[in-house]
Amino acid sequence: MTPMTRRQTLALSTTVMSGFLMGAPALAQGRARVVIVGGGFGGAAAARRLRRVDPDVDVTLVTEAAEFTTCPFSNLVIAGERTIESITFGYGALADEGIRIVVGRATAIDPAARLVRMEDGAALAFDRLVLSPGIEMKYDRVPGYSKALEEVMPHAWKAGAQTILLRDQLAALPQGGTVLIAVPNNPYRCPPGPYERASLMAHALSRTNPTAKIIILDAKDSFSKQSLFVQGWEALYPGMISYVPFADNGGILEVDGGEMTITTAFETFKGDVVNFIPPQSAPQFVQDAGLTGEGEWCTVDQATFESADVPGVHVLGDAAIVGDMPKSGFSAAVQGGVCAHVLAALLRDRVPERGVLLNTCYSLVSPGYGISVAGVYRVAEDGHLKSVEGSGGTSPVEATPEFRAAEADHARSWYATLTTALFG
Amino acid sequence: MNIAPTSLEKGIRDIRICDTFLCQPARNKGNTLVLQRKIGKKAALILFVALGPAAAGAEGEQISYLSCQVCHGAAGTGSSIPTLQGRPYDELLTLLTSFATGTAQTTIMHRFMVGTTDADREGLARYISQGEGDQP
């Protein structure tokens, strides 16, 4: 048998799928169809929860790849502390539950016809659509930067091949070399992520390359858990990490992949490794469908995640602005679960119930030193998903090493529990 | 398309039967919900619908519990975060209240519980102690 190319396999799978959904009305009759685009934390959570809340709904999960590599814990891979395989998951458990997995790229949404159009020409019909498509890099915002340059200056802000590239570059850093990390302005995926990355790079370098330097060029003047990170850096990696806020760099004017330089308003920085994390937005096909209004992120009803611009389409996770919740895997997973309850209610003409939503972002300053920021969110009378006053917040600045170690353990437990629940 | 336009009790897992009958929930009997529909003036059709694991508990509590489950998994996994399964109502409520009032030492739970109401914590303790959320 001639092996099919990956593309042929994808085409076949989406064709079979759409044939079932669209060409066999008798089979679909009486069953509501929910299509979920995005195989990350939000999409997987929505799909699995919906199967449990209402087994009579046909659930299709559209995912760009047959496996999902998580951004959480990818900084441990870059630091050589974990394998890429240990943060990569398949969809077999979801398929076993009766969720239809379609591997392929969604390229357009037709809300009037209630169709998701796929790159291979197939179309998936839905009664309600959930989008949890994550982010897209904006390659055109900084002179000199381009998609091609991500192979030279990896962002590693979508985990997978980019993660491996940055890991290998870091391992090959010359003795005493310099790592540049360029961080975009808010909003972007995982607000504390760049600083955890600097931390874990420093952890790796402090053992193999102790005279190396890490310079963070930030497009903003402060960041999530800043005092906790800085305290950890001073304790664990004194002198290795330099933080240059916007006020001290004036913004990035140009990058040069040949020279490996980043030119800011005030100075040109040269790196042996350059981790350029570009600004981000909701993916283009989401913007093209009119889901982002005048902006670059989706505006949604913060209780139901239904688009403010396109009825019947729900958006959650990093691509949406969901009240005060940050763009995190934890938030997306919670939103996906809640959205499943919302869909089950709306498909039966019930008014969806509401609950309390939580988020936690754990960051590892080293593998044995964890810090966190927590949030409690509730839909207020004005419809805004608001952070509950007086709740949440960060780990204490004054804490024992045992406390930091416990939070590092909790970070690992959180990761194991969530990935098992979603993909196991 | 919409299915089963009913206001049936929350969490009914097998609702297909209601596509053809306008059901009224009569009483909850163990793991079975008894539904009846009057046909004509006197006759009553009684249907038994098996309830799935999501049956008990208000849906608002199920929704709130989703956030707990992100960290608190099943017992016996070696997690540093304790399981909530199998804990009685009184123990859970006492614990959650002590987090809310700041009398119990934790790394993170007090930051969550200060953002909850008495009713939130009672509802969660009830829902978790009933074991209905143990299904992953």
Image (tube, rainbow, N blue to C red):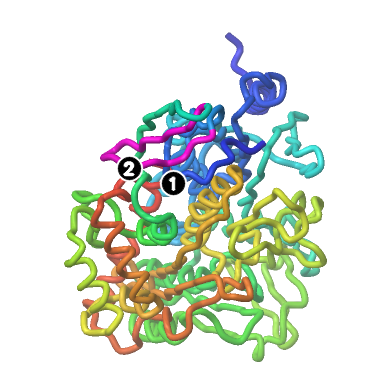
Give above or below for A7 relative to A407.
Answer: above
Residue that carries the numbered disc 2 in the rendered image: B28
Give above or below for B56 relative to A296.
Answer: above
Q: Is residue B25 left or right of residue B81?
A: right
Task: Write the residue at 43% across / 86% down.
Answer: A390
Q: Is residue B129 left or right of residue A68?
A: left
Secondary structure, mark 1, is loop
Specify whether residue A171 is in view: no
Q: Which of A375 and A78 is in front in this view?
A: A375
Q: Nearer the viewer, residue A205 or A58?
A: A58
Give percent across and percent down for residue A114: 75, 39
Residue A238, quarter of picture = bottom left
Do the CB atoms of the residues marked 2 and 1 lie less than 8 Å apart?
Answer: yes
Magenta segment range?
B22-39
Give percent across and percent down for residue B98: 23, 79
Q: What residue type is labelled 1?
A: Glu
- Could you tell me what secondary structure mostly forms the magenta stretch? strand
Question: Crowding near pointer 1: few (<14 within 10 Å), some, many (20+)?
Answer: some
Give percent across and percent down for residue A306: 66, 56
Q: Earlier in the sequence, mark 2 or mark 1?
A: 1
The residues tagged by marks 2 and 1 sit, at their Cα atoms, a distance apart of: 10 Å
Task: Write the residue at 32% across / 44% down.
Answer: B135
Give percent across and percent down for residue A257: 71, 63
Task: Write the residue at 23% across / 69% down.
Answer: B93
Question: Crowding near pointer 2: few (<14 within 10 Å), some, many (20+)?
Answer: few
Residue B9: which numbered mark, if any? 1
Q: Is residue A24 left or right of residue A222?
A: right
Please tell me whether residue B37 belongs to the stretch shown in magenta: yes
Chain under callout 2 = B
Please tell me whether residue A202 belongs to the stretch shown in magenta: no
Q: Which amino acid does label 2 sit on?
A: Asn
